[in-house]
Structures are given as structure tokens and as C-alpha cells.
Image: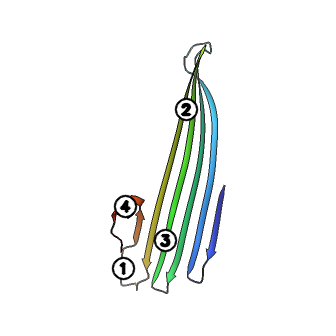
Amino acid sequence: MTGTIDLAIGDNLSLKSITAYREASGTSVVEVDGAPLSILKRRLGKRHEQVTQELRLTGKVGALVDFTVGGFYYHARDRGHFRVMIPTFQYDFLADDRSQNERSYFDFLPNLPDHLVLPRLDILLHPRLREALPMS
């Protein structure tokens, strides 16, 4: 499921929000003993949930500069349930993994005359890197 909102905040400024959610799950059973009779089996269950959010502010400063400032958030959770089935015994294993990630970015593009060329400046900052850099 995805949702996008575009909002014009005047002639030279716009805000965009992109939000997404997805989930998936499944179960499988595997015979692990290789015997002709089904004696030793392993059941695997898996569930995944994920949320992402991006917020982007884009604008112009006259004819001089185009810019984009934004941020991105990612959060996911994976749950795995593993059961080994042996006659008279059942062993259960539960894995619960989570991951989370945040990023911010800044893109600055000066509109210079054709005879002046500057490299494009793209900065992708991890939160720890932002804290380490001296910013005025």
C-alpha cells in the first residue's frame, strides 16, 4: 500500500510525502531425514512487515539555485518460527529481527552560465555523520 501527497507551497516551493507499507507471510514444511517414511520434518513460518516514509522539500531561489532537502525513514520487522518435528518431541525456535534506518539528504544545483561549470553537490548524511560534522 502506497500513498503520495504533493503540496505546492507557493510558486517556488513544494513538499512531497511518500508513505508505503507492505507485509508478507508464508509457511512451508520440509522433510529433512531423507527416509521413505515421513519421520523427521521441519516447519518454517515467516512474517515480514515494512514501513517507509520520505519527506522532500524542493524549491528555487530565483533563477540562481534549485534545491532539495529531505529525509527517509525505514522500519522493518521479520519474525521467523522454526519447528523441528520428531516423533514424541517438538523443538521450537523463534527469531524476531527488527531493523530501522534513517537518512537525510541535501541537493544543491546552481544555475550558472554555460561557460562556468561546477560539480553537482549531493550529500547523503547518516545521523551519526551529521553529529560529527561541524555545521554552522
Residue picked out by circle 3: 69
Q: Nearer the viewer, mark 1 or mark 3?
A: 3
Q: What residue is shown at x 51% (from left), y 61% (from top)? A: 72
Q: Amino acid at mark 3?
A: Val
Query: Dot 1, crowdedness within 10 Å: few (<14), some or many (≥20)?
Result: few
In the picture of the structure, the residue carrying the numbered disc 2 is: 94
| Mark 1 or 4: the one toward you | 4
Number of the label disc, if any, that sits on residue 37:
none
Q: What is the three-letter code of the residue carrying label 1?
A: Val
Give the CA distance from mark 2 to mark 4: 35 Å
Local SS, label 2? strand
- The N terminus: image quadrant: bottom right
Counting residues from the start of the chain, the first of labels 2 and 4 encountered is 2
Q: Earlier in the sequence, mark 1 or mark 3?
A: 3
Q: Determine the CA span between mark 1 and mark 4.
A: 28 Å
Give the answer, above or below, for where 10 lies relative to 102.
Answer: below
Could you say where residue 75 lies in the image, as x and y percent from the top left? 54, 51
**Which numbered tag is attached to residue 129?**
4
- x then y, percent, for residue 81: 58, 32
Whether residue 126 appears in this view of the structure is no
Q: Quadrant of the C terminus?
A: bottom left
Residue shown at 49% from the left, 73% from the top: 68
Tell me the distance, in whole angstroms, between the alpha carbons under discs 3 and 2.
41 Å
Q: Earlier in the sequence, mark 1 or mark 4?
A: 1
Q: Nearer the viewer, mark 3 or mark 2?
A: 2
Provide the residue designation for mark 1. Answer: 117
